[in-house]
Image (cartoon, rainbow, N blue to C red):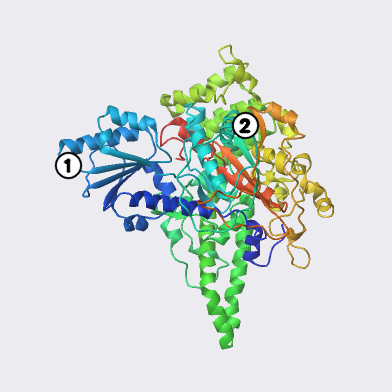
Amino acid sequence: MAATSTLSSDVQTVFGVEEPGLDVEVLKESARKGLINALNSVNGAKTLVLDPSLAGPLGLVTEVALLKHHGVDKMFWLEPGPLTSTTTNVVYLCRPLIKYVKIIADQIKKHAKESLKHRYTLLLVPRTSTLVSRILEEEGVLGDVSISSYNLQFIPIAEDVISLESDSAFKELWVDGDETIIYNSALALDLVQKVYGQFPRIIGKGDYASKLATLLTKPLPNQSLTAVNTTNPSAPFDSLIILDRYVDMITPLLTQLTYEGLIDEVIGIKNSHVELPVSLLNPPPPPNQPPSQPSTSTPSTSIIGEKTKKHVLSAGTDPLFAELRDLNFSSVGRRLNRAAHRLDEEYKARQQAKTVAQLRDFVGKLGGLQSEHQALRLHTGLSEILLPYTKADQFNKSLEIQQNLLASYESSAQVTAIEEMIAQGADMQTVARLLCLASITIGGIKTRALESVKREFLQAYGYDLLPFLLSLSAPPLSILLPHPAPPSIPATVIANRLPFSAVRKSLRLLIDDNSEALEEVENDISFVYSGYAPISIRLVQCIAQKNGVISNPAVDKATDRTTNNDAGANSVNQGDTDGKGKSVASKKLYAHPIVGWKGFEDVLGTLPGKTFDIPRKVNDSAGPSPGIPHAPSPIRPREPTTTTVVFFLGGCTYTEIAALRWVNRQHRGRRFLIATTGIVSGASLMKSMAGDGKRGQDP
């Protein structure tokens, strides 16, 4: 990968400054003003009782000082037990869950017994529910509560990613059979249409994705929207791609190998925040310390027992993170070293400054240099935390098993290796992920071997996990199955088994090129897993970058840059320049039109779930609906840019986001907006299905 002369040019390539995407901050501003309006509807000082699961999402759109400015006197978590309020007004803000409604009813009844007079307001997120009213009525407190909604939908978590931040969406759909998230997703996507314009085409794969697409073709209830003062209609959408998480269960089960993905695997990223040692977040040392040796000021690589503090990982405020987040972790050290040497040169310029003008110029740069120095120190420290994890025996053994399963190499031996990991004390979520991965890639684990490993699993981790194992095997999930299948397994489950070997070949999931070269040069989306391409992003390429599926950009790179094929799949890498220092991004070809699944019908038929392609009539003269928030247009004159929304129903991983950003950098004329119900990983999926907050965590 060719190096650029400055960090800013790298970041320009990452963000695609030449072709900015939609202004997703409009959604954040709308959510913030909606909350303010909801609070202002209750006159006077108020006590806010908050659903703990909403604290993170709300932290992305507002801050405590703003809540206090609009009358919030005190804040409490919504949890069982008495509520002490010094204000007449009590505002409950929560999701419409039965457990929360019963807590609210108990607190109101307790206040009534104590002759305490309060006015109660219940704000439900994202919409009101008839079930809530019925429960309050049964509890005898419906008349005491004013019920309304706070329409919190998509929240921007990056400049090109919006999320519903629903951590339990996958479990609700594929374990509990609760389809509420499908309707909520439809409302959220409908709001996006009202803000930015209609989707002229809805394409996707998966049974639940098909239900969502059907909902979007029907009239949906009007939603309360908060106007934001913006001008000009935004770039038109060319399509909405909906992918059911179940269509590609392999990707989240794999260990993420990008920088941001590995942070999520090792430390955990929650609502864009990560818990880091306080010593790592301290102000940088004086500038007279050479930044080329940043590790001298970083804390120990262990965060166990060290006081931690929440830190937001944002490319908007941390340009170095923007450069690092999507890299394969093996490339992060080289990039950090490059940034350190560049900063070192900048500091040396101070010694060469002799005139007053030169000194003034350096002082003007000093603030920015100190910020970059702190960012370099932070990410060097983070890398030092991750490095021991990547060198641990368990990590490498797990990676070896994953790679062997993906290559269909001695599959039965991999099941034995997983059983050995249980005996060696591997953590529960790692073993569960590997077992499910083996079942999906092999087509089911031999009955005797599966029964043996299940027995070992329960003896090692506790028999309270038996319901968890059963949920992995039961429809509609069915990702841990025996082979041959017993008569008790429904025929539909057997029919949905993934013929992995055939799909691997058809979608070119494994790249045979040298893995080290893949990680550094990034000629294919497979760099995110050091040689394996996520099925989900290959499906997006089937629609938006067909040549990226059919052939290897690493081979076609030179040809693609000199020919005008209609696929626009020429490979332009992050930071590439021509011999004169000019970015080769200017040589990128225009993206080919969206033509649906044409050419990939056979492989789609082997993947589980329905395939759909729904064209819609769109009024060209109609931009965003009047009176609602919309964003400024990023279209440049004479070079129209369209936006493709890719929605992951059931969650997506940081590696999938990194891979889709790579696709985004390969052409002009199209930008991707990534939308999801939430950010997931194999660990978070196993943890949610196990149903215990302590399960799935590293020891």
Q: Would residue 178 be found to the left or right of residue 547 on screen? A: left
Q: Residues within 10 Å of mark 2 (few under 14, many from 20)?
A: many
**Residue appearing at x 60%, y 60% in the figure:** 336
Q: Would residue 463 be found to the left or right of residue 500 on screen? A: left
Q: From the top left corner, tell me how far across and down residue 566 is, in percent.
A: 80, 47
Q: From the top left corner, tell me how far across and down residue 177 is, in percent.
A: 49, 26
- Badge 1 amino acid: Leu
**Residue appearing at x 43%, y 60% in the figure:** 279
Is 218 placed above or below 496 here?
below
Between 640 and 648, the one nearer to me in the picture:
640
Q: Would residue 610 be found to the left or right of residue 466 on screen? A: right
Give me the C-alpha separation between circle 1 and circle 2.
Answer: 53 Å
Between 52 and 467, the one nearer to me in the picture:
52
Q: Pointer 2: what residue?
A: 247
Helix, strand or loop status at disc 1: loop
**Residue appearing at x 22%, y 43% in the figure:** 118
Q: Which mark is residue 116?
A: 1
Q: Residues within 10 Å of mark 1 (few under 14, many from 20)?
A: few
Q: From the top left corner, tell me how far across and down residue 146 is, in percent.
A: 30, 40
- Badge 2 amino acid: Val
Residue 264 appears in the picture as rendered: yes
